[in-house]
Image (tube, rainbow, N blue to C red):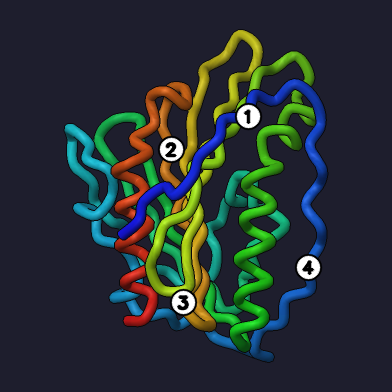
Amino acid sequence: MNLLASGRRYAVAGSLAAACALAVAFPAGAQAAVPPGAFLTGDELPEHPSGWWALGVEAGLPEDPVFCFEDELPAEGASHQRYRTDLDAEALQVVVEAEDEASAAALAGALEAAAAACAADWLRENPGSAAAWDDYGTVEGADGGHVFGVYVAPPQAGMSVSLFGVGRDGTRVTLVDWGQMGTLQDAPVEEFAGTLGSALGRLGS
């Protein structure tokens, strides 16, 4: 597997182009019935001292909006699973079953654009804060995946770093979200690239 084909770091010093809105079609009245086998297990996430436990696959999207992707992820056709540790790290995987491959490709593109614009969008909404992002490149597998990193630090508050993996296999699209306190330098990029590769391998389950 060719992990991280190319990566570049971008510090957010101004506005980035907003992601273009894409029309994505999903099956009418679709039920979120993605099988559990399409989701990562805890031991496929980047290693953590306390270990990971999965909270179980649920239909739809999480109750709380998914940071950076509030407007892109459709509830219809979606299932999700959260992952916890004993400390500050947590993760989330969302899998969406789209109506056809064109719709799935459009959704994956919209998610990638949202990840790339996230830090700048957040900074505009939180003046006086600090933010940065990284494009860590592509991951091979299925119809391909892409890894991004986002760092945000509100003034006089904690700092947090997130890694986002977006991938697709046919009509199925996944978003993998890992986060903890820290900076981009603290993010386990290579391990997370392996996690996204595992997620791509599971999408056909």
- Which of labels 2 and 4 is toward the front? 4
Query: In the drawing, what numbered circle is on residue 169?
Result: 3
Type of amino acid at the residue the image marks with label 1? Tyr
Sequence-earlier tag: 2 or 3: 3
Up-down relation of residue 95 to residue 100 (above or below): above
> Helix, strand, or loop for circle 3?
strand
Query: In the drawing, what numbered circle is on residue 102?
Result: none
Which quadrant of the structure image shows residue 48? top left
- Where is mark 1, residue-wise? 10
Q: Position of residue 199 (x, y in %)?
A: 35, 64
Up-down relation of residue 103 to residue 184 (above or below): below
Residue 199 vs residue 100: left or right? left
How would you rate the neighbour count of disc 2 (Cα within 10 Å): few for under 14, some for 14-19, many for 20 or more? some
Q: Position of residue 23 (x, y in %)?
A: 79, 73
- Which of labels 4 and 1 is toward the front? 1
Structural distance between the alpha carbons of marks 1 and 3: 29 Å
> Helix, strand, or loop for circle 1?
strand
Sequence-earlier tag: 1 or 3: 1
Structural distance between the alpha carbons of marks 4 and 1: 25 Å
Q: Are marks 4 and 1 in contact (CB under 8 Å)?
A: no
Indicate the quadrant containing the C terminus: top left, top right, bottom left or bottom right: bottom left
Structural distance between the alpha carbons of marks 3 and 4: 19 Å
Q: What residue is shown at x 39% (from left), y 31% (from top)?
A: 187
Structural distance between the alpha carbons of marks 2 and 1: 19 Å
How would you rate the neighbour count of disc 4 (Cα within 10 Å): few for under 14, some for 14-19, many for 20 or more? few
Residue 205 vs residue 111: left or right? left
Type of amino acid at the residue the image marks with label 2? Gly
Q: Nearer the viewer, residue 153 or 197?
A: 197
Q: Nearer the viewer, residue 145 or 87?
A: 145
Q: What residue is shown at x 55% (from left), y 64% (from top)?
A: 61
Sequence-earlier tag: 2 or 1: 1
